[in-house]
Image (cartoon, rainbow, N blue to C red):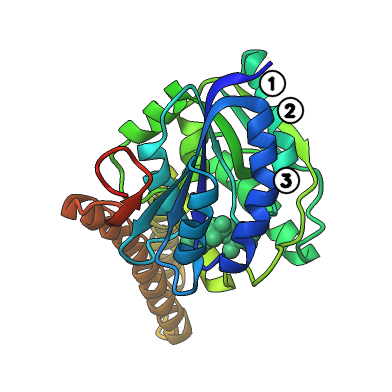
């Protein structure tokens, strides 16, 4: 059974070498599962031939639409741009490097027809990643779920099929710091996993350096949890209580044994330790204020330079 229409959103950043191979595999699948399909490729400020290749492919497949962003805004923003333009009851997100097998789409659609609003690709294994990265990632998602009350499967990927109402809910979220994996979980609706084997990247290297990943991970936590802020209230109260006991102890020993002059080491340690704690907690406050700052500036998530293939007068 074919669905009436399916939109596919693909964020592309320097994927020129992968685009043609991707469509070779994707289009036959789309032809079999949907009466009408559209693929929205978001060119996230690529500096290679990505745009030219997409344009060439558009002549072959009129269902391809292109949104070119004015610079590299990051994968989350690129996905948001695609979702803002996606129409219809079934919207799929996948990577442009063929790590997400298009052959899984019929299976995902079947699960959606059985009633799930969100069908997410669940990696069977993390064989394309190092052991350390896999372990860190599991640890992170465990921590995230605990801190944020938004449960998230560690192996869940951006490869997912969503119903029109989920996409509408995501599009209605005004926040600028977008941690998509958290947002998919936050909007709710019924989720259903669909297992797949993640393939190695077809060509080129992952755009996620360790630094970028750490930034992404930290963004996720502070966008979805206020526990790092509350933590300092607990630490502060703990230290204040201990100080009271210590003051009592000093008073008592002074009364019993008379005044004691030495104590230089205790003082020095206390000053440095508390100074360090204060700076750290101010730093955490700063992280949240920085996000408030970003949100209040209210800049758009992305800027579109040009679009192709939409029925709005553009070519
Ligand atoms: N991507 C993007 N903008 C970026 C980085 C990545 O649109 O700034 C796209 C990229 O082209 C690919 C997808 O996001 O289609 C996943 O990126 P990548 O393969 O580098 O990440 P990984 O698979 O290692 O998580
Ligand atoms: Mg990849």
How far apart are labels 1 and 2 at the CA level?
A: 6 Å
Quick one: quadrant of the N terminus?
A: top right
Residue labelled with disc 3:
101
Label 1 with label 2: CB-CB less than 8 Å: yes
The residue positioned 17% from the left and 55% from the top of the image is 297
Q: Report whether residue 302 is seen.
A: no
Earlier along the polypeptide chain: callout 1 or callout 3?
3
- Name the residue carrying label 1: 111
Who's the residue at 58% across and 40% down the image?
145
Circle 2 residue: 107
Q: Where is 218 relative to 100, above or below?
A: below
33 w.r.t. 287: above or below: above
| Secondary structure type for disc 3 | loop
Q: Is residue 92 above or below residue 282?
A: above
Q: Residue 181 or 38: which is nearer the viewer?
A: 38
Please tell me whether mark 1 or mark 3 is closer to you in this view. 3
């Amino acid at each position: 059974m074919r669905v009436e229409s399916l939109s596919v959103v693909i964020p592309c950043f320097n994927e020129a070498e992968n685009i043609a191979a991707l469509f070779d595999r994707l289009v036959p699948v789309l032809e079999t599962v949907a009466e009408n399909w559209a693929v929205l490729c978001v060119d996230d400020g690529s500096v290679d031939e990505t745009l030219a290749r997409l344009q060439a492919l558009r002549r072959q497949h009129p269902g391809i639409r292109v949104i070119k962003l004015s610079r590299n805004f990051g994968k989350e923003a690129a996905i948001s741009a695609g979702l803002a333009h996606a129409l219809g009851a079934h919207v799929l997100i996948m990577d442009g490097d063929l790590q997400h097998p298009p052959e899984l789409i019929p299976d995902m659609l079947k699960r959606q027809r059985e009633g799930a609003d969100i069908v997410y690709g669940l990696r069977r294994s993390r064989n394309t990643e190092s052991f350390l990265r896999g372990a860190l990632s599991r640890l992170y998602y465990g921590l995230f779920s605990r801190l944020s009350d938004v449960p998230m499967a560690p192996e869940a990927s951006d490869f997912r099929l969503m119903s029109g109402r989920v996409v509408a809910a995501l599009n209605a979220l005004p926040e600028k710091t977008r941690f998509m994996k958290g947002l998919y979980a936050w909007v709710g609706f019924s989720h259903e996993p669909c297992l797949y084997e993640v393939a190695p990247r077809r060509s080129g290297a992952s755009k996620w350096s360790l630094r970028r990943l750490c930034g992404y991970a930290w963004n996720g936590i502070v966008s979805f949890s206020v526990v790092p802020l509350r933590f300092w209230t607990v630490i502060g109260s703990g230290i204040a209580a201990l100080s009271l006991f210590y003051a009592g102890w000093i008073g008592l020993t002074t009364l019993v044994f008379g005044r004691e002059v030495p104590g230089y080491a205790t003082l020095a340690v206390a000053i440095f330790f508390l100074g360090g704690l204060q700076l750290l907690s101010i730093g955490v406050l700063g992280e949240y204020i920085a996000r408030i700052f970003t949100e209040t500036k209210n800049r758009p998530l992305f800027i579109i330079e040009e679009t192709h293939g939409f029925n709005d007068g553009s070519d």
